[in-house]
Image (cartoon, helix red, strand yellow):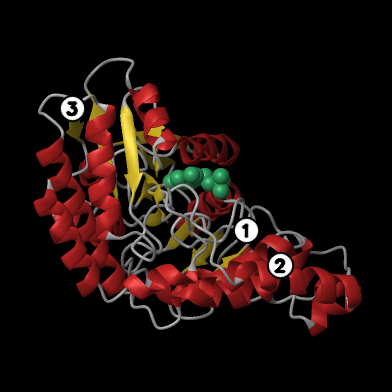
Amino acid sequence: MSDFRERAEALDSADGLAALRELFLLDDTVYLDGNSLGALPAHVPARMQDVLTREWGSLRIRSWDESGWWTAPERIGDRIAPLVGAAEGQIVVGDSTSVNVFKAVVAATRLAGEGRDEILVDATTFPTDGYIASSAARMTGHRVVPVAPSDVPDALGPRTAAVLLNHVDYRTGRLHDLPGLTAAVHDAGALAVWDLCHSAGALPVGLDAHGVDLAVGCTYKYLNGGPGSPAYLYVAERHQAAFDSPLPGWTSHADPFGMTPGYVPADGSVRGRVGTPDILSMLALEASLDVWDGVPVEAVRAKSLALTDFFLECVAAYVPEGRVTPVTPVPHGERGSQVSLRCEVPGETEAVMRALVERGVVGDLRRPDILRFGFTPLYVGFADAERAARILAEVLGV
Ligand SMILES: Cc1ncc(COP(=O)(O)O)c(C=O)c1O
């Protein structure tokens, strides 16, 4: 065991991102749930105090202009853009991921044009995407075809309008082949819509480089935006002029204060807006993005893989065979930034996670039998990974 502790110490001292941990408000808990809710960057409370007392309290309505509230959705979208490999002007922040899935899927079917009546949906998707896609399909006269991501190339055809996929599987942590699948979707003449909730902020996405059509994602996981922080919508520049939002609210109007009865869409990413932005959450997100200044996503990815490799090694060494089985793929090209372990004793999962949390290791679970451990390279270190595996072994009675 001490061998792993020594290695963890050496890895932490060689870690070029280790100093970033100081930017977050953390205690001695091993926090491995940043894939659900990221930690709080330490400077955000003071920024929010200023937003509340000065921008809202003193300036009140003037802040829509003077404090830049009105343009926050596009401005913050441009802050997220480099983290997902997008040039400026293509991302707008607002609403929840679920709502943005609706906008993206309906808009994709409209962009695909007549004669294509199928929407392929990741059969392993986070449920909300499936629910929303099914409703969108009913409203637009399409049919949803559930398909495992690896089977998408075989399921594509002249009837496919759009394909909705998760970049990283929320349950298993499997990373799907965004470049390859997007290319296959395009070869079939359809549009690719990606859900980036579990990849943005954890690994390079390359939206522009891989020609993704539309994408959505949340900001409260690896982007540390805070509970319920607004999501984002990416519409590739080449689609913006024809992007026909199914929720054409007044803030996406070309002249929102003209208050005209007829809808005229604004140009650019603004077209993805709907109603009044959720300013408090949005500005907490904006402040929290400061921790990314000068941090290359590639370095984050390298650390994430090293952390998850190390955790898997510690688990294999500390936990006897047969108690838990990793379901997260071992090949780096197929792994997101979490490790999911299946509990092999039926009914044990909830008790195991409860005991871990009581001992200061916070992960979460997905029923019936998956223990999830998310690794956020900005604030998780190798000693955390070692400690989590060691305490897991203790909890399992080793
Ligand atoms: C992959 C994925 N998609 C969508 C969602 C739902 O996002 P929201 O609650 O912001 O609509 C989640 C939430 O965890 C998610 O993990």
Answer left or right for 97 relative to 192: right
Question: Mark 1: is the Cβ under 8 angstroms from ligand 1?
Answer: no
Question: Front-most of 337 and 123?
Answer: 337
Q: Secondary structure at mark 2?
A: helix
Q: Which residue is mark 1?
A: 245
Query: Which residue of the protein is positioned furthest toward the top in this rendering?
Result: 346
> Helix or strand or loop: what does disc 3 sit on?
loop
Residue where numbered disc 3 is placed:
398
Q: Is residue 82 above or below residue 365?
A: below
Q: Which comes before the other along the chain, label 1 or label 2?
A: 1
User: Is ligand 1 closer than 8 angstroms to the Cβ of mark 3?
Assistant: no
Residue at 46% across, 36% down: 130
Which amino acid, by three-letter code, is at mark 3?
A: Val
**In the rendered structure, are the residues bearing label 1 and label 2 in contact, judged by CB atoms less than 8 Å apart?**
yes
Q: Mark 3 against mark 1, which lies toward the viewer?
A: 3
* Residue at image mark 2: 252
- Quadrant in which residue 247 is drawn: bottom right
How crowded pointer 1 is (Cα within 10 Å; few <14, some 14-19, many 20+) is rated as many
Image spot of residue 206 (x, y percent): 33, 70
- Quadrant hosting residue 226: bottom right
Q: Which mark is residue 43?
A: none
Query: Quick one: label 2 or label 3, which is nearer the N terminus?
Result: 2
Spatial CA distance of label 2 from label 3 is 58 Å
Q: Amino acid at mark 1?
A: Ser
Say whether residue 304 is visible.
yes
Instruction: Estimate how packed mark 3 is, as few (under 14), some (14 to 19) or many (20 or more) residues with alpha carbons within 10 Å.
Output: few
Distance between mark 3 and mark 1 Cα atoms: 55 Å
Residue 276 lies, in percent from the top left, at 77, 62
